[in-house]
Structure formats: structure tokens, C-alpha cells
Amino acid sequence: MSSLQLSVVIPVYNEEQGLQALFDRLYPALDALRLTYEVIFINDGSRDGSAARLREQFNVRPDVTRVVLLAGNFGQHMAIMSGFSHCRGERIVTLDADLQNPPEEIRKLLAKMDEGYDYVGGVRQQRQDSSWRRHASWAMNKLRERITHVVMTDQGCMLRAYSREIIYAINHSKEVNTFIPALAYTYARHPGEVEVAHEERAAGESKYSLYQLIRLNFDLVTGFSLVPLQMFSLVGVGLSILSAFFVAYLAYRRIFYGPEVDGVFTLFGIMFFLMGAILFGIGLLGEYIGRIYQQVRQRPRYLIETVLEQDKS
């Protein structure tokens, strides 16, 4: 077992403007914990000068800093997965680079783990996001909880703490697309949550658009539950029964009242509704089939260009 007590994993994507502010707060906060620690920065194919700034910081604190440079942009969760594969601490904390979750709050998560929890999620208080983003997040959380039974008060908060056992299980999961907080929840024996502060971004802008947030939640639902398929199956059965009764009714009308033109537009409306339901079902099936397709290709989830770390041999 590694002698390191804490690993802090931080994905970085186009955060050049705010990195110095992160460095100035992160290292003093970790030093104050009086633990042996390492900080692992993962550059997720940044197009600005983030990689250069991380190299500079590695030269400043090579004893506790490691930098993983990915050979492209693979997304936040894949960047974190690459960090998990390199971390050596007994406890692992993930943190965003934008300082919306203050590094000083890490102590709260570790204190919660001292109570016996093996996975602790942060719950942002007085969120500094826009109103639509807060309401959309609340709605997505409720929908996701009902469908997947993954209970997380704040699934969008990346400030989370994991035990080494959970990280080991995550590293041995072979899913191409995954949502790390939900995956960790399924492996945790004693998950917990703690309230953490939330601040405005130090610099730059959010990397998640509305479409990406919707896409992320759709991936989460289809990745952890078959309920959408089962619900659509029930809808299909119901529509089939109603369609059978409707056809019987039309046949009865034709036999006893003869052919008629009235009701053509109603028939068209019903037909378009059924076509829409069919197309929705095809799209839903496509989501699951697409996940299978990505999985069976067995392509690497990320590619590492180089790792900057101090040789301790």
C-alpha cells in the first residue's frame, strides 16, 4: 500500500487564465491538512497555454505534483479516469480547476470519511450558477434518481472523495462511457454527502452547454438503467391495444354506416402521433445499440502523451 494518504485529481481543459489562482489556494490548503499528498493534473487536450502552465507548476513543486498530458480531448470523465489510473493515495479527491469548489473544502470531505464513509459527495450551497441551470439540474436529478435509483443530491458537483477500494473497482470497469459519481455510488458500501461552498468561476467559462448537460444526463440514464426501454415497451403495448380497438371501431362504422370522409384529419392526427412514438422508440433503441457498438470496438478510452513526475526510484 502506498504511503501517500491523499491524491487530488484535477482535470484541466482550457483553464490557463485561472490556473495560477488555483495553485495559490490549492497547495496551502493541502499543506494545512498535514497529510502526505500528491496533486495529479490531467490536461485534457487544452488548446490554450494550460499545458505549459502545468509544466511550470510541476517544476515548482515536483515533490507533490504530477501532470498527465492526454493526446487529445477525451472529456472530463475520461480525464479523471486517467488520473485514477495514476493516483497512489489511500483517499482520492476530485476537484474542478475553475475554483467554483474551493480547495479549502477538501478537509470537510476527509472529515466525513473519518466517520466511516467510503464515498463522500459534495453538495453545493448557495450555488453561483444561473437560475435556469439550477432548475434544470434539480429536474435532471429527480428524473435520474427515479429511473436509476442512484441517490445523489448534487450530481453536478465534482468535489468528491473516494476510498482506494472504490477507485480500484472503477479502474477495473471496462465501460466506454461512464458517469464516475454514479459508478462510484454503485460500488460504495457506505456513501455519504457533505455541504460545501460554491463560488463564481475564477476565470474562463463553463465547458458544459445546455445540449451537453442534456446529453450527459441521457448517457447517465441509459448507462445505469433499462427503465427507458421498459417504459417504451409498455407504451407500445398500450398503443397497440388502443390501435386494435380503433381499427375495430372503424370496421364497425364501415359495415353499418358505409364509407365516410369525415374524421380523415383525426385519423391523420392519430397516425402522426403513432409515427412520432415509433420514431422516439427507434431513437431510444439507437442509444442503447450505440453504447453496445462503442463497447465492442474496444478502443482505448483515452491516450496519454506523457506523464510528468519525479523519479523516486
Image (cartoon, rainbow, N blue to C red):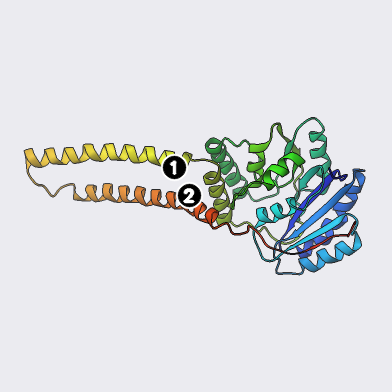
Using residue 110 as the reference point, say whether residue 186 is left or right of it.
left
Give me the residue at 48% from left, 49% from top.
288
Where is residue 164 drawn, in percent x and y?
76, 41
Find residue 282 and report its horizontal and vertical position in percent. 39, 51
Instruction: Please name whichever residue, 267 or 193, is drawn nearer the observer in this view of the structure.
Output: 193
Where does the image place residue 8, in percent across and percent down from the top left?
80, 49
Q: Residue at x 86, y 62 (%)?
A: 58
Quarter of the figure that contains the C terminus: bottom right
**Label 2 sits on residue:** 288
Q: Quadrant of residue 140?
A: top right
Q: Which residue is farthest front?
A: 313
Q: Is residue 244 above or below residue 174?
A: above
Tell me whether the residue at label 2 lies in contact with that at label 1, contact meaning CB atoms closer than 8 angstroms. Answer: yes
**Mark found first going from the N terminus, 2 or 1:** 1
Distance from Cα at disc 2 to Cα at disc 1? 9 Å
Q: Quadrant of the N terminus?
A: top right
Q: Quadrant of residue 60?
A: bottom right
Residue at 31 percent of width and 40 percent of height: 239
Q: Amino acid at mark 1?
A: Leu
From the image, tell me which residue sits under label 1.
229
Toward the viewer: 232 or 209?
Answer: 232
What is the crowding at mark 1: few (fewer than 14 residues within 10 Å), some, or many (at least 20)?
A: some
